[in-house]
Amino acid sequence: MNSNPTHKKPTKLRISRAYFLLFLVLTISFLLGIGGVWIYKEFSDFHKESQNLRKESIERQKDLLVRNANECLNFISYQNKISETRLKHRLENFVKQAHAIANNIYLGNKGKIPDTEIKKRIKQAITALRFTSGRGYIFINTLGGKGVLYPFSKENEGKNLSNFQDLNKNFIVKNEIELMRYKEEAYTKYENHHMVKNKYNAYTKVSFIKKFKPYNWYMGSFAYLDDMKGEIQKEVLTRISQISLDNNNYFFVYQKDGKCLLHGDSVSIGQNYQNYKNPIRRKNVEMLLKSAVMKESGFVSYPDPDAEKGTKVSYIQYIEDWNWIIGAGVFTSDIDKSIEIAGKELQSKVNRYIIQIISIIVLAIIILYFTTRYISSRMKQNFVSFNNFFRRASTQSYKINTEELHFTEFQDLAITINRMIDIRTQKEKELLLAREKAEESDRLKSSFLANMSHEIRTPMNAIIGFSELLQQEDLPQETRQQFFSHIRNSGNTLLNLINDIIDFSKIESGELKISKTTFSLNQLFEELYQTFEKIKTKKGKDHIKLEFTTGLDNSNSLVYSDPLRLKQIITNLVDNALKFTEKGIIQVSYQVDVDSLIFSVKDSGIGISKDKQDVIFSRFRQADDSHARRFGGTGLGLSISRKLAELLNGTMWVESTVDIGSSFFIKIPFLQNEKAELTPINKNTKRKNGYNKNLYGKKVLIVDDYKVNLTLIEQMLHATGLELYVAENGQLAIEYCIKHQIDLVLLDLQMPELNGYDTLKLMRKEQPKIKIIAQTAYALANEKEQILNSGFNGYISKPIVRKELLELIYQMI
């Protein structure tokens, strides 16, 4: 019976299994590769170190020889330096010993025996004293120069020696007598510059003399520095012999003539190398002596007489003053033995490293095998958990239990998956909140536009309405003046509204600039007081008391800040206080708080509720936004004031109670710049001659592309006696300047084709000294600075006030 064979699906490799095998293979390969490279590097380093070992060993031995030789030379140099000091001390002790003997004899026999007998005994006692191997003795002379005691030159006793000279023509006794006139004891020294040999074959003589007052004597002794050379050389040889070198190495010292003074072989000391029996040794010493004399110092290599010790390297140094050759050497066979020992240690060290490397690799492979297997098992469990999650999450809201996962990456993935629903919910809430904010923003903008429409149309209504009424011919003059006043006040209201909008735009765009200067704070307060007294009267609120209080006396009220912006902030606050106060008092003051200035504006008005106190500083917001609100406004004043306070590095806040009143505070840094000049707050000062200066016949050119502006300025200047010319563009203005001798030009900046700046440049070419005033409707922060830097003589902004225009013309003409 036939049966169909069973077909099994091919078994696919699991990720955990694949990870286990791949990681294990890669790890073992990596470890073996690293181990091989490590072992190769150790062998390579071993060969390099072996090659450098001999070179370094020889160099170290050479350095050691040089250091030891320099130690000997330093000792010789030191002994030479102190030889004179030592000799002086010995002479001083010798002479003081003789002086003590003489003094004892004198004191012991004074008054007992005659002076002649005392002198005789002193001479007998001192005559026997000797110094420096019997060559030195004590001599005695009178302070008048007469010889008293000369043990080896009896002919000098009783003889006047004042004119005695030595071989170098030095007046020895005369010089000594001169010293004893000022000193009780002294040293003398004579250099034999002519190199004339005395009987001792010495060149430098040192003496010590000491006064003996009882008989007006002075006694002394002398010696030659050359007497110290032998003693120093003995000490040097003893010192060199004590310097420790290796067992087979030693110092040797030869004289230039070949005599051995010091050697490791004691038999050689005292012999001349030419008497050495070993010819190789004689040849070596002869080569050392010649090299030392020629080079003065250096290394010399030569074969050692003992064949088994090989070559010897010596460092030699020639001491010319003593005709000595000092040297020390090392056998290369000793170096080779050291290298062999070091090489064996190095080889042993490399072998240990290799064993350690292999052990580490084997241990690492074992650890990694079990570690990889463990990780693979954990990974498999995590995949099972994810598989179960996706099966259940397809039908229900189910989250992965992160505690069941063993790897941070899987836990992060699980947390991300679990947060998806939470994030979606959160996003929905954020979208709803954003929608509410957008609606609130649209509402605020709509309210602001409605307020702006109201605030603009209200004064415009007055301007247009009263302008129409003024066309009536039968109006009384008083009524006409009232209508004109209403039109002017409404125009100023519109101008203030435009300035607020411009300031707000500058603040929002970051273009508002602070210009700090030194000014009088009390003067600023006085101007504000005078201004608001008039405003209060105009608004019909004379019954409200207005107080301005200063916190500093006039002499100390100079501060460094921006007076215009500070004035703008206080003006806004006082204006609001007048608006919202129907009775009571408005108090404006400032006080110093350590390094700050705190300004306050307090009123007894309607007050602000707690929930509205933060809102009022927001843009487009007012305490009362309803259509039934009692007070107008754009909702920008307080927002601008707070921003200005922050630009002055300060803060602004409010404290208020409904129906009681409000207090606004501004805190800015209290800065004083003593070096700066005081800047007046009101820069529009009159000329010394006032307005009475005769302007008749002066030619003024008015340039503006807007005919209404031309007519307005002509009417403003009609009664001044000025001869007026008008031009509607820059080209006509330049032609007027060419044809007429113009005294002053009022030049608009914004004109078609040829603007004010280009017109200025061309006018200057024709008339370099002509006075030109810029007139502009721009309100940018740096506009005035740009205008004056461009070459204009003055500046006036639109809308033009007749009084300010006349003041400027009087200043220019």
Image (cartoon, rainbow, N blue to C red):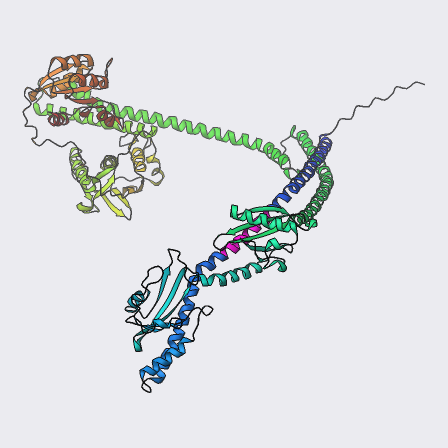
- Tell me if residue 3 is in the magenta stretch: no
The answer, for residue 235, to whether it is visible in the render is: yes
Q: Is residue 585 left or right of residue 426?
A: left
Expressed as whole percent of the image width and height from the top left, the position of residue 409 reads 62, 35
Give the residue furthest to the front.
155
Expressed as whole percent of the image width and height from the top left, the position of residue 497 reads 25, 27
The stretch in magenta equals 59-74
- Tell me if residue 63 is in the magenta stretch: yes
Q: From this view, report whether residue 130 is shown above or below residue 777.
A: below
Q: Is residue 307 left or right of residue 456?
A: right
Quadrant of the image containing the C terminus: top left
Q: From this view, report whether residue 1 is shown above or below residue 536.
A: above
**What is the quadrant of residue 686 in the picture?**
top left
**What is the quadrant of residue 378 in the picture?**
top right
Q: Nearer the viewer, residue 497 or 428?
A: 497
Expressed as whole percent of the image width and height from the top left, the position of residue 473 reads 9, 17
Expressed as whole percent of the image width and height from the top left, the position of residue 661 reads 27, 42
**What is the quadrant of residue 610 in the picture?**
top left
| Majority secondary structure in the magenta region | helix
